[in-house]
């Protein structure tokens, strides 16, 4: 699984409207400068807390929200759910100094596309923002390590598994290990088309759409390590 995908080589995005939610004015100022240095991106507003962010999104068209997790009053994770209900198509990128496994799990479950720690470089921040604008997942170095830690665990509290076939469980385990559809096809001696069909069925049965979400599902279901032939 690639946690640091390369930015898309397609044409630069146009008129991407960004809102920044962070309780530190200096951070907002820095992020605004970085965001607006990228072609096609415009910061259309910022908020210091959750309530202000919700008010802003009620009155302003927004494509991407850059969100801190720790703020006074409403937490970032709580705000994220409210924002998704208010503006369902908005893309959320977490930019925070408070990353831990629970926060990463919550962010992925909520459907965020990007998670970047504040100690990451500005190049990582820019690449994450461009990936999120293109509808791609992007996880900074620390976030990537935390996801791999979650996947490698065998938690005591296992989630209820969907009714998966033996082959679907096999595919899921390999996806959780970061293998591509082509790599899985070679390992299992089947066509890439067959693997893609199984992955599509997995997404339908679990309701999950992203590799990181499927990986966490495999770990929580106790399937990691059960590579079934």
Image (cartoon, rainbow, N blue to C red):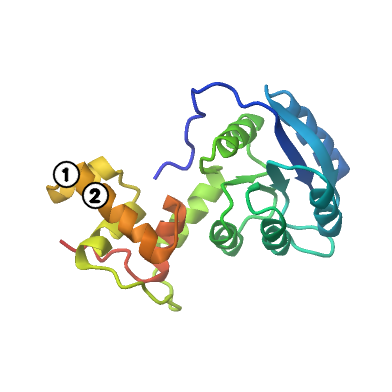
Q: Is residue 218 or residue 14 the one in the foreground?
A: 14
Q: Is residue 175 or residue 43 the one in the foreground?
A: 43
Label 1: how many residues lie within 10 Å, few (<14), some (14-19) or many (20+)? few
Q: Is residue 134 or residue 225 the one in the foreground?
A: 134
Give the residue displayed 15% in from the left and 61% down from the top. 229
118 horizontally vs 44: left or right: left
Give the residue displayed 69% in from the left and 53% down from the top. 87
Where 129 falls versus 73 (above or below)?
A: above
Label 2: how many residues lie within 10 Å, few (<14), some (14-19) or many (20+)? many
**Mark 1: which secondary structure?**
loop
Residue for badge 1: 191
Figure disc tally: 2
Residue 131 image offset from top left, x and y in percent: 55, 35
Residue 127 image offset from top left, x and y in percent: 58, 32
Residue for badge 2: 195
**Mark 2: which secondary structure?**
helix
Residue 25 image offset from top left, x and y in percent: 87, 42
Rendered-image quadrant of the N terminus: top left
Q: Which mark is on residue 58?
A: none
Answer whether labels 1 and 2 touch (C-beta < 8 Å). yes
172 horizontally vs 89: left or right: left
Give the residue displayed 70% in from the left and 50% down from the top. 97
Where 33 falls versus 85 (above or below)?
A: above
Residue 27 image offset from top left, x and y in percent: 80, 40
115 horizontally vs 49: left or right: left
């Amino acid at each position: 699984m690639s946690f640091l995908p390369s930015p898309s080589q397609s044409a630069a995005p146009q008129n991407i409207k960004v809102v920044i939610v962070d309780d530190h004015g200096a951070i907002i100022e820095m992020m605004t400068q970085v965001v607006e240095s990228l072609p096609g991106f415009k910061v259309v507003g910022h908020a210091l807390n959750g309530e202000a962010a919700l008010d802003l999104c009620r009155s302003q068209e927004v494509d991407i929200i850059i969100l801190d997790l720790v703020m006074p009053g409403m937490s970032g994770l709580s705000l994220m759910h409210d924002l998704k209900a208010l503006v369902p198509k908005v893309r959320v990128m977490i930019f925070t100094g408070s990353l831990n496994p629970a926060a990463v799990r919550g962010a992925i479950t909520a459907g965020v596309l990007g998670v970047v720690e504040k100690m990451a470089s500005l190049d990582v921040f820019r690449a994450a923002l461009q990936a999120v604008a293109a509808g791609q997942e992007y996880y900074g170095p620390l976030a990537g390590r935390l996801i791999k830690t979650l996947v490698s665990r065998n938690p005591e509290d296992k989630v209820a598994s969907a009714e998966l076939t033996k082959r679907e469980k096999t595919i899921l385990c390999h996806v959780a290990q970061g293998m591509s559809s082509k790599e899985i096809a070679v390992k299992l001696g089947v066509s890439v088309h067959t693997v893609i069909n199984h992955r599509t069925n997995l997404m339908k049965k679990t309701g999950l759409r992203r590799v990181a979400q499927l990986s966490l599902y495999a770990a929580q279901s106790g399937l990691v390590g059960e590579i079934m032939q």
